Amino acid sequence: MRRISLLLFAALSVLFLHSGALSASPGLEKERIVIAVGGKNLFYYLPLTIAERRGFFKDEGLIVEIPDFAGGSKALQALMGGSADVVSGAYEHTINMQTKNLFIREFVVQGRAPQIVLAVSTRTMPDYRQLADLKGRKIGVTAPGSSTAMMVAYLLAKAGLSVKDDVSIIGVGASTTAVNAIQSGQIDALANLDPVTTLLQKSGSIKIVSDTRTLKDTREVYGGLMPAAVLYTTEEFISRNPNTTQALANAMVRALHWLQTATPDEVADTVPKEFLLGDRALYMDAWKNVKEAMSPDGMMDPSGPAVAYDMLKTFDAEVAKRKIELERTFTNEFVLKAREKIQ
């Protein structure tokens, strides 16, 4: 009888292992998670890739799928449409969505500076002198409505121009499509991120107009530190899945911690080869340009939400006339617990 019981237990154990029932950490409300991202190859989202490639999500019992979209606005659409659980995207979207009476919340900060660069083509605008020269021009962004497009709208508004009336905004993605668009003359200016920016800069294809890859430059552009890439999701998801949200935060904070001491070689060895854009040395140089922009701990700086809000009010009439509940756009609760676990 005892032998039969042991055989039965062994058979059930195999069944549970194959079904994933024993692979998840205790208390996870949801084991399989879809994280939408727009431009996964960018350093802007590097912590997400590190957490995935180094197995940090897996260590938390999570099975994570990361569909990659042309830009952050498309990733947001996936969340709102129900095909994604979480987004790795720009913090600004948490503010924008309140104008539609939709509440989404950041729970891990990946970047404390946007890393976005606005540059003009040396081919089509060799005589560029000021932002007003962009009137009537074609400006490439990762995708309309994404953080790159918001930076363009903000800078143009400060110069007295409108993205609706004075320029053409064109989505060009965040990889070789963006490189080809500027080098072929399809666009006159580009708002994009590294490694794309460094590649174009070294080839002499662009002249930088505005740069937010360092903390100093970010303060000059926005008047303070601007939260960049974050993990965000709906308030409903967080309330229904607090343990799963915590597991995601644990993995991401661990990735941020790893990046603080990682060498350029270690970073290049970890990411997929296609992220290197065919030039490993250039990729490592680009990493040095943006490393300071990475959050060291995943925390939202107390002044960050207000900086983002003020930026959006400059060009977005809906945000300007709406009372935004900034306290509902972020939480440090999960990061604080994740940091305790690491320490």
Image (cartoon, rainbow, N blue to C red):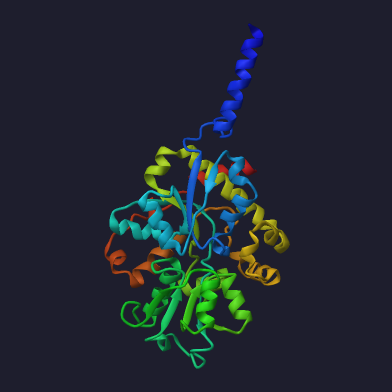
Residue at the limit of the structure toward the top, as seen here: 1
Residue at left offset 48%, top offset 69%: 173
Q: Is residue 309 left or right of residue 9?
A: left
Q: Nearer the viewer, residue 160 or 127?
A: 127
Which residue: 53% across, 89% down?
Answer: 123
How many numbered badges does the structure rendering display? 0
216 with respect to 321 (left or right): right
Q: Nearer the viewer, residue 247 or 335?
A: 247
Q: Quadrant of residue 292?
A: bottom right
Q: Residue at x 56, y 68 (%)?
A: 215
Q: Position of residue 244 (x, y in %)?
A: 49, 40
* Quadrant of the frame with the N terminus: top right
Which quadrant: the C terminus? top right
Residue at position x 42%, y 89% in the image: 133
Percent position of residue 97, x then y? 34, 57
Q: Is residue 16 above or below residue 185?
A: above
Q: Quadrant of residue 319?
A: bottom left
- Percent position (x, y) of residue 32? 50, 41
Pinpoint residue 330: horizontal percent, then vertical percent.
43, 52
Q: Nearer the viewer, residue 85 or 233?
A: 85
Residue 242's place in the image compared with 51, above or below, is above
Q: Say if residue 303 shows up in the picture.
A: no
Camera sees residue 95: yes
Residue projecting furthest to the left: 321
51 w.r.t. 1: above or below: below
